[in-house]
Amino acid sequence: MAITISPITPNFVAEIFDVDLTKPLIATDIDAIKAAFWKYSVLIFTQQNLNQDQQLAFASLFGPVERERTLDPKATPSRFNGAFSDISNLTSEGKIWAGDSRQRMYKAGNKLWHTDSSFKYLPALASFLYADTTVPVGGHTEFADQRAAYDALSEKEKKEYSDLIIEHWIVHSRKRSGFSDFNEDEKKRLPPVPQMLIRLIPESQRKSLYVASHAGRIFGKAQTEGRALIDRLLAHVTQRQFVYTHRWRPQELVMWDNRCTMHRGTDYDDLRWIRDMRRVTVSDCANTCEQAGMSREKSLHYSFG
Ligand code: OGA
Ligand code: MN
């Protein structure tokens, strides 16, 4: 039986039924899931009961898995190997984290609107977040459609923004959420990087905004002016009409297109309930400036002095 696609809105978010991700998929199902993904950008697979290998196998169909973790594993050990981000509120020993733990401080940044890995020179294509244990109150994940937000800009704005390049840096978003405790190794591994503000998504041929809380400066604009525009765009993209709120059920996988959506986690009582989630992320094909035609050399040497 072929998969069933059940859209939540006409062009954003769909639920996929009649598929078992614990088993290798047949080619026609893979093609149908990919086509749905390019159209809807967020896909929900409920009742999957995936182990780590199965989650990894499904994610690998979409690109190379990111294996380098953002935080230094020595300073902040994880329950998982490098292929998984621990999105739970658990320590490496599986206990609920302490109120003042480094993990908790760092992960508070996930409650800001962002897209995964835009702060890496080679950003992310897609993320695959699996919920093992969910919480009874709060702990939702919200998604915003940056393509629809682009479509809603005026022609003047579209033109004005089309060539803008933004500096993304993990330090920008963590400053916003109150975490500044990066060690030397982390700072060295995570320098600021350039990304286009507007990008074309090849599969759908739709244009999209590409902003996130990781964005801090706009090339060629004064710091305050650039920051004001970034804040305005974050507010624009996250207006209610562009946002879907996902209420998690256990044993559920949600995948999203980091190229053209933002997401954020909502609050829950993380010192009381266990929310056990793990994420795999796959890389895009190139930096967004390179995708827009800039040479690798120029893009790599982009400086904001
Ligand atoms: C993520 C993320 C938010 C949440 O997994 O990348 O930002 O709801 N998650 O936990
Ligand atoms: Mn995220």
Image: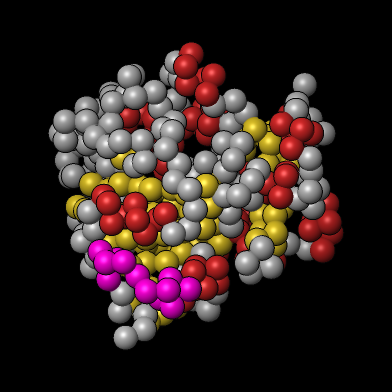
Which is nearer the eye, 1 or 168? 1
Measured as percent of width and height from the top left, residue 171 is found at 54, 27
* Image side of residue 145 versus residue 107, left or right: right
Q: Is residue 14 visible?
A: no
Measured as percent of width and height from the top left, residue 237 is found at 60, 56
Measured as percent of width and height from the top left, residue 226 is found at 73, 36
Vertical order, 190 against 34 (above or below): above
**Residue found 43% across the figure and 78% down from its top:** 28
Extreme residue toward the top, this view: 184
* Image side of residue 214 versus residue 21, left or right: right
User: Which quadrant is home to the N terminus?
Assistant: bottom left
Q: Is residue 61 visible?
A: yes
Vertical order, 62 against 221 (above or below): below
Vertical order, 149 against 285 (above or below): below
**Residue found 70% across the figure and 59% down from its top:** 200
**Residue found 34% across the figure and 24% down from its top:** 73
* The magenta segment: 20-31
* Image side of residue 29 versus residue 21, left or right: right
